[in-house]
Image (spheres, rainbow, N blue to C red):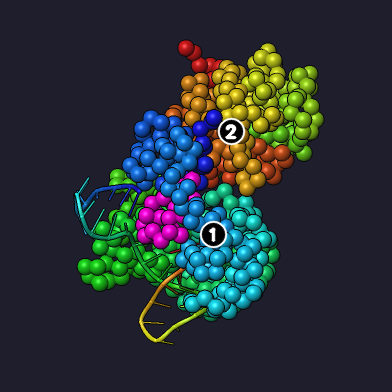
Amino acid sequence: MADPTNSELAGALDELGDLYELDGAIVHRVVAYRTAAKAIRESPVAVAGLVREGRVTELPGVGKTLEEKLTALLETGTIPAAEKLRATFPAGVVAMTKLDGVGPKKARRLHEELGVDSLEALRAAAEAGRVRELKGFGPKAEAAILAALDAHAQRGDAAPRLLLPKALDVAERILAGLRASPAVERAEVAGSARRGADDVKDLDIVVASEDPAAVAEAFAALDAVGAVQRGGAGGARGVAPNGLAVDLRVVPPATFGNLLQHFTGSKEHNVRLREQAVRRGLHVSEHGILDDASGETTRCATEEEVYARLGLPYPEPELRLDRGELDPGWEAPELVTLADLRGDLHCHTVASDGLATIEQMALAARERGHAYLAITDHSATHGFGNDVSPDALRRQIELVREVDARLEGIRVLAGTEVNVLPDGSPDYADDLLEQLDWVVASVHTAFRMSAERMTERIVRAVEHPLVDALGHPTGRLIGRRPGYGVDLAAVIDAAARTGTFLEINGQPDRRDLDDVHARAAADAGVGLVLDSDAHRPETLANQRWAVLTARRAALTAGEVANTLAWDALEARRPRHRTG
DNA sequence: GCCGTTTTCGGCCCGACTGTTTTCAGTCG
């Protein structure tokens, strides 16, 4: 039987944390399970392997006890403590703790005192007016439970999340509206949107102003804020027309830095930051930094002042993920920017499923300041758009050469996004691939093979000497489809061995590789390419999202291959490697 | 349950909001 994935191992620890929490364990013990689950989920290597090698305690937050539990899970398929607790707390009770406003304490009392053991039973009890009979519960608590059950019935377990570009579009319109108000001195988006996350649950907007009432009024009047659910001193909550919740917070300019830092998060970053500060007698909150020794609170107008007061280098928002950025001795890397990119190595034209011609795409890339653009239409077996047969590709190469000769100021490269067949070979012959300047190999078909076979398939493609880059390496679609089961550590190893580049695809629902694995690839010496995968001129701008993922991976310009001039990059292609 | 410039025990971020309370527990981010 295949080893459990990191996600499955993390899920088991999260469940055990939930069960211990219901059982009344102290909160720190529960937090320890969740911290360990996060470390496992974000690990770029297969944690099951670490457990077998006796190395799993190298992960931060995993100690002897959790090592034993993970070992039991691998050897027997279950954790004894979880088995025992499941007998006391049925799955329905755990499910109750996921409802808005219901936590472990309330769920346990509903279970013990009303015999409720499922969401259905909870609804029946609430509708019968039995919940309000419990001490500490009242009519409002009962109504809130019914509302939470309705919300759960509508959206299921996962709260709806919006892809980053859609959320930022709302944020930018709100910010523009707020900045037009004379009462607003500064307005910024905070939260996961500012950190460049793949998708967001809600927007946090923070404002510096001496007149919060005027700001709240301006906020409520914005078209981008459809309905204001509640307002009050220092803030308001609205809902954008597309359903995105928007939280507004307003403070005087003197503490804007504290507020922006606090609401940018991440939560884990802030917890770590505050724990370290406490050891030095400092207490950090959105209101300022309290010094135990003097009793003084330092208020900061900028975030830079917050980090400086704590003696820390300033971490860019994308790096605030509690992945070592607060460790002693950490130095802020100079993160790659969109302006560093000198070319784009993945786009489509009307030859396959794109909407523009070679020339239109090239002119748009030149307009964006690029020095080169690779035209990489899909290959024949792909199945989307027009089939690009070998003969059609030969004609396409001639067309590219013709456009390249005619246009000044942009190098147009002949390429392909060649399909990786189930056996790992590209679906054009080598003598044709040899004529191309740039070959991206991608998996588009036969997703459902075992992890072992998929890994062999992709490693074989990476090892092909005429494959320059692996496109969207995992095939994930954010919020819709997990990646194919593939051992990325083996893929990264093969790429490091062969000099093949790995792509960070900039389509906003791909961003594939993700930040964790992009970091692991760079650490292994693999070059990353940040591509738009544009299908029309406007979506060349999608490189922006690849750059954000790269920044979350702490990539510098030196770790991104398409920051190089084409001549330098061409010389680094795998086909030029010897030995 | 983890961890150590308070190191093998005794701590473990901070505040807002809500509903039920007469001073606070639970939940959330």
Q: Is residue A249 left or right of residue B9?
A: right
Residue A540 can be seen, yes or no: yes
Q: Residue at x 50, y 57 (%)?
A: A89
Nearest the eye: A324 or A563: A324
Task: Give me the C-alpha separation between circle 1 and circle 2.
Answer: 32 Å
Q: Report the number of numbered marks.
A: 2
Residue at 45% across / 34% down in the picture?
A: A75
Q: State the residue at coordinates (57%, 61%).
A: A117
Residue A451's spot in the image, x, y percent? 58, 29
Report whether A129 appears left or right of A326.
Answer: right
Judge whether B1 appears above or below A471 on screen: below
Assess disc 1: are there few (<14), some (14-19) or many (≥20) residues with their C-alpha within 10 Å of its C-alpha. many
**Magenta stretch holds residue A33:** yes
Work out whether disc 1 and disc 2 sit on a shared chain: yes
Q: Position of residue A85 (x, y in %)?
A: 46, 53
Quarter of the N terminus of chain A within the rendering:
top right
Element type where label 1 sits in the image? helix
Numbered label attached to residue A530: none
**Sequence-wise first label, 1 or 2:** 1
Q: Which residue in the structure is indicated by mark 1? A: A93
Q: Which residues are magenta?
A: A12-35
Q: Is residue A239 above or below residue A486?
A: below
Amino acid identity at mark 1: Val
The residue lying toward the viewer, choosing from A186 and A423, is A423
Q: Tell me, yes or no, if residue A370 can be seen here.
A: no
Secondary structure of the residue carrying numbered label 2 = loop
Q: Residue at x 30, y 68 (%)?
A: A290
Q: Chain of mark 2?
A: A
Disc 2 marks which residue?
Answer: A485
Q: Which SS does the magenta portion mostly show?
A: helix
Measured as percent of width and height from the top left, residue A563 is found at 52, 34
